[in-house]
Amino acid sequence: MAAKNGAIKLVAGNSNPQLAAAIAAHLGTPLAQAVVRRFADMEIFVEIQENVRGSDVFILQSTSFPTNDHLMELLIITDALRRSSARRITAVIPYFGYARQDRKPGPRTPISAKLVANLITTAGADRVMTLDLHAGQIQGFFDIPTDNLYASPMMVRDIKERFDVGTVTIVSPDVGGVARARGLAKRINAPLAIVDKRRERAGESEVMNVIGEVQGRICILVDDIVDSGGTLVNAAEALIGQGANDVHAYITHGVLSGGAVARITGSKLKELVITDSIQPSESARGARNIRVLSVASLIGEAIGRTAAEESVSSLFD
Ligand code: R5P
């Protein structure tokens, strides 16, 4: 594919080779020849093995587990491209790690999401493209253009294909996610419920209050991240306890740390739908109640439009 002002090049880090290959296939542009490898002491070494001078380059790299290694790969690839006279470098980061550290939770604590934004900019990125940022305001941590893509239109399509939307209630698994869940509920014209986790007294266990009517409903939990799975599994319990017929979940980023897959497999969740913003592990792919939707065409389309200097936001109209 050609950009408006020259060739487009795709360079993949090691975080998600399957998604990178699928994006390349969508664009009909092969991944650029590059090696990202380790020295004996695990330092990262990058060599771009084809000419990128004057090119519009898109680096495909989620800063997922192992986060620090993948972040460092992204920074070093960016540096290599900058020193190779790429015309424009876009860091395409489907999953933006450290996003949950977007404010000071207490005195003498860092704002790591801002630090990561500074590192990416300093390394030489001209633009950033990401997906379902934990908090939209993180775009403001960058002083370079940042496109935050949304998985919700894909999820809405999938929900409409699989459910009678008249029976569905969209649920936010915590108070922090209400805006995101409300947005999706609006798109399918479904009611909204909220799971409110509260510790009434210190030392007592948390009480899950469900705000909204879920009795006899198909509940669909919506969130940006599933990490340990605790939030989802507890919310599913609370909803079933309040008389929900079935509980499903649509979550953009399947971080799925530690025993998350086993926790979800053994839970009351009928199905968890994640995207491939983070490369799903074999156990996630094989789990009885986990399904993966690919964001390859969404990201490929956004890359194509960026290269052609066309609107990206109109993808979500
Ligand atoms: C938190 O604000 C996020 O939106 C998710 O709800 C959270 O990261 C999920 O974590 P876990 O799966 O470990 O409960």
Image (tube, helix red, strand yellow):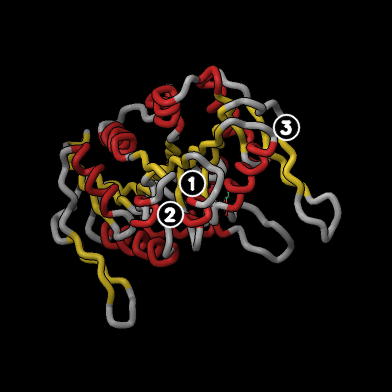
Residue 269 shown left or right of residue 28 in the figure: right
**Residue 211 image label:** 3
Secondary structure at badge 3 equals strand
**Residue to which mark 1 is pinned:** 143
Q: Is residue 225 visible?
A: yes
Q: Position of residue 35 (x, y in %)?
A: 20, 64
Q: CA distance from mark 3 to mark 2?
A: 42 Å
Q: Mark 1 or mark 3: name the one nearer the start of the chain.
A: 1
Judged from the image, the secondary structure of the residue bearing numbered disc 2 is: helix
Per the image, the residue denoted by label 2 is 121
User: What residue lies at 50% left-to-right and 43% top-to-bottom?
Assistant: 133
| Quadrant for the N terminus in the image | top left
Height in image: 298 above or below 78? Answer: above
- Spatial CA distance of label 1 from label 2 is 8 Å
Mark 1 and 2 residues: CB-CB less than 8 Å, in contact? yes
Residue type at mark 1: give it. Answer: Asp
Alpha carbon separation for disc pair 1 and 3 = 39 Å
Is 304 located above or below residue 10 in the figure? above
Q: Determine crowd level at label 1: few under 14, some 14-19, many 20+ residues with C-alpha closer than 10 A.
A: few
Query: Which quadrant of the figure has residue 309?
Result: top left
Image location (x, y in percent) of residue 62:
38, 53
* Callout 3–callout 2 Cβ contact below 8 Å: no
Circle 2 packing at 10 Å, graded few (<14), some (14-19), many (20+), is: some
